[in-house]
Amino acid sequence: YAPRLVCHECGWLAQCRRCDAYLTVHQKRARLQCHHCGAEAAVPPACPDCGKPSLERMGKGTERLEETLAELLPDYPIARVDRDTTSRKGSLDTLLNEIRNGERRLLIGTQMVAKGHDFPDVTLVCVMNADQGLFGLDFRAAERMAQLIVQVSGRAGRAERRGEVLIQTHHPEHPLLIQLANHGYNAFADAALREREDAGLPPYATLALLRAEASTATPSRAFLESARNLADSLGVQQLGVSLLGPAPAPMERRAGRFRSQLLLKAPERAALQRLLAEWVPQLETLPEARKVRWSVDVDPADLF
């Protein structure tokens, strides 16, 4: 329903006790849920900190959009496709059939509605809050945003009638968004690739990410410091490999575990592979390795 629950009296925010994340409001179930670890709690009747009944649901989730559209367009049956409405076996197929048969005229959904579905009667597609992709923490966020917009845009105007796509953003002047909207995905990709080249990011470099986690923050950071020192002793600079970190993960605490990471970057894949071949087996011998869970991800899909 809403990404955040906040008290306007004292500033309290509903946060997960096990993750560095906000709890999402699920209105119909009257529950708060963490979408990272699955933890749940009841929606409080008043602020747990100040006791005032001034709790406000901030932002718009699919449930809230459904509620708003039902008020504005009461004559148009709505289908909402998300984790809540498709959790039961067969529920997704039922909803999709109702959409194709014309029983539902408005479709609201998360990314799952953008892929692999043919709705020939759809003539208008709205992409909400595209800024999440433009300003995401991961360098591939804009690329994923553009791919999603292209995918969901393909749902509009697939039959004889012309389709239209609306993109909600606070930054219509963003150069990548302008390229995508005015010139298509290829122009967007060219602009994004120029940014990647200037920053020394893939495909103009090769990455590997050493992740470590523990029940407290200290062991993982100590392990990564030792891992960095080990890489230095193996001649990482002579190989042309750069080390960034150690640093906390963008979401440091998840499901009660504290996570840190060390990023390795090389202009040539061969140089990185030479280092990893010698470095990774020796990581297992570090005394700090016994106190953490760790992994090496070559060509990581994300940096979280």
Image (tube, grey):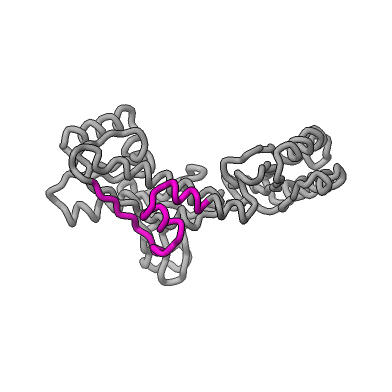
Is 279 displayed left or right of 213 in the figure? right
Q: Percent position (x, y) of residue 6? A: 42, 63
Residue found 37% across the figure and 41% down from its top: 151
Q: Residue furthest bottom?
A: 9
Residue range in magenta is 163-192
Residue found 67% across the figure and 45% down from its top: 215
Residue found 18% across the figure and 42% down from its top: 161
Is 197 displayed left or right of 14 in the figure? right
Q: Percent position (x, y) of residue 154? A: 32, 41
Q: Is residue 181 above or below residue 173?
A: above
Q: Percent position (x, y) of residue 70? A: 20, 52
Residue 138 in sight here: no
Is 68 displayed left or right of 14 in the figure? left
Q: In this view, does 36 lie above or below 100?
A: below
Residue nearest the viewer, comparing 275 with 36: 275
Query: In the rendered image, which quarter is residue 72 located in?
Result: bottom left
Q: In this view, does 270 lie above or below 229?
A: above
Residue 67 in sight here: yes
Q: Percent position (x, y) of residue 164? A: 25, 50
Residue 78 magenta-drawn? no
How many numbered circles does the render carry? 0
Q: Which residue lies furthest to the left in this view?
A: 75
Residue nearest the viewer, comparing 205 with 152: 205
Is 95 displayed left or right of 249 in the figure? left
Q: Which residue lies furthest to the top in this view?
A: 90
Residue found 74% across the figure and 50% down from its top: 243
